[in-house]
């Protein structure tokens, strides 16, 4: 391939990338505008919102409970091998930072990506393939308003609640195991835990849960609507949705950590 052809191919790729980025930005702008309108006017799609909260939030409670209790117990069991780990004040700060600030939001996000994010992309993609989107447009209903906006709200709300639920069960499980090992009463552990809690711990967890929820929902909805018509595209878009959601959540986690450090410092 000659130099001119290489430059031409590179220019083509750059133009295509910029075109895709502009399309993504426009789609997300429309999605968030419809989400705000949904919140303000309670437009059609309320049933979709309820069903999304039921699937993403309520039905995920057993998984989150098992995961949070198990991870909390493992942290204590592994940490008990370190000298004075279970007897010092550092125990409570480590649990709060590891569970509340990091594991709670991230692991909850991964569970929602695996369950709800993939389900949203698959469902919307199949609806595109079966021409259901055109049916909604023919009766004056925009699919993003009916199917996209309620899912953004439902996933974000569920992500917030599940993260708080994970934090409570994770801390409770770890302290329960710790009290069994050290013979210290659970009430005393809880009292010391609350004494080591700071507002920044709660704020960090809340911000991450909301940001991760928006990222997961917006990414899943976008890839679902981006199916062009072939049924073979659906699993491909689903895999891309899962991968992109994980990457964006991890990147957002790093930015939020830096932001919290800058504000605290």
Image (spheres, helix red, strand yellow):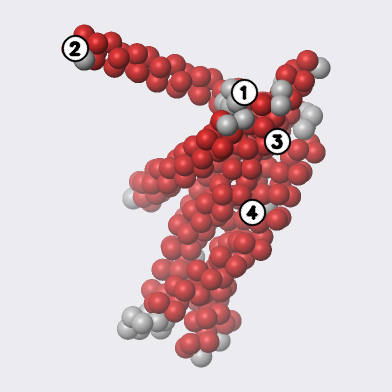
Which image quadrant for residue 76? bottom left
Mark 4 → mark 1, Cα distance in angstroms: 35 Å
How far apart in space, not on screen, are marks 4 and 3 (Cα)? 17 Å
Q: Position of residue 219 (x, y in %)?
A: 54, 35
Work out how far the residue at label 3 is from the one at label 2, CA to CA, in angstroms. 51 Å
**Relative to residue 108, is residue 41 depicted above or below?**
above
State the CA–CA distance, disc 1 to disc 2.
37 Å
Residue that appears at 45% across and 57% down:
102
Horizontal relation, residue 58 to residue 156: left or right: right
Residue at 56% over, 47% down: 113
User: Tag 3: Cα neighbours inside 10 Å, few (<14), some, or many (≥20)?
Assistant: many
Which of labels 4 and 1 is toward the front?
Answer: 1
Describe residue 235's horizontal placement relative to residue 81 as left or right: right
Tell me, for residue 229, which label it has, or none: 1
Contact? badges 4 and 1 (CB < 8 Å) = no
> First in sequence: mark 1 or mark 3?
3
Q: Could you say whether the residue bearing mark 2 is in a helix, strand or loop?
A: loop
């Amino acid at each position: 391939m000659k130099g001119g052809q290489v430059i031409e191919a590179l220019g083509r790729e750059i133009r295509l990338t910029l075109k895709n980025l502009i399309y993504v930005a426009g789609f997300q702008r429309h999605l968030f505008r419809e989400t705000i309108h949904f919140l303000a006017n309670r437009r059609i799609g309320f049933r979709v919102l309820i069903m999304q909260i039921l699937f993403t939030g309520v039905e995920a409670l057993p998984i989150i409970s098992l995961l949070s209790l198990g991870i909390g117990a493992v942290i204590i069991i592994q940490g008990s091998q370190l000298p004075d780990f279970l007897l010092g004040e550092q125990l409570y700060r480590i649990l709060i930072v590891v569970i509340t600030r990091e594991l709670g939001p991230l692991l909850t996000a991964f569970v929602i990506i695996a369950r709800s994010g993939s389900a949203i992309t698959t469902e919307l993609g199949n609806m595109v393939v079966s021409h259901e989107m055109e049916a909604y447009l023919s009766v004056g209903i925009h699919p993003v308003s009916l199917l996209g906006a309620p899912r953004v709200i439902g996933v974000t709300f569920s992500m917030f609640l599940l993260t708080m639920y994970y934090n409570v069960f994770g801390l409770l499980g770890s302290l329960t195991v710790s009290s069994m090992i050290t013979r210290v009463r659970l009430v005393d552990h809880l009292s010391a835990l609350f004494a080591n809690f700071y507002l920044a711990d709660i704020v960090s967890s809340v911000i991450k849960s909301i940001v991760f929820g928006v990222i997961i929902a917006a990414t899943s909805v976008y890839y679902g609507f981006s199916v062009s018509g072939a049924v073979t595209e659906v699993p491909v878009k689903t895999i891309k949705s899962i991968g992109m959601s994980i990457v964006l959540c991890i990147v957002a986690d790093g930015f939020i950590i830096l932001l919290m450090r800058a504000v605290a410092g």
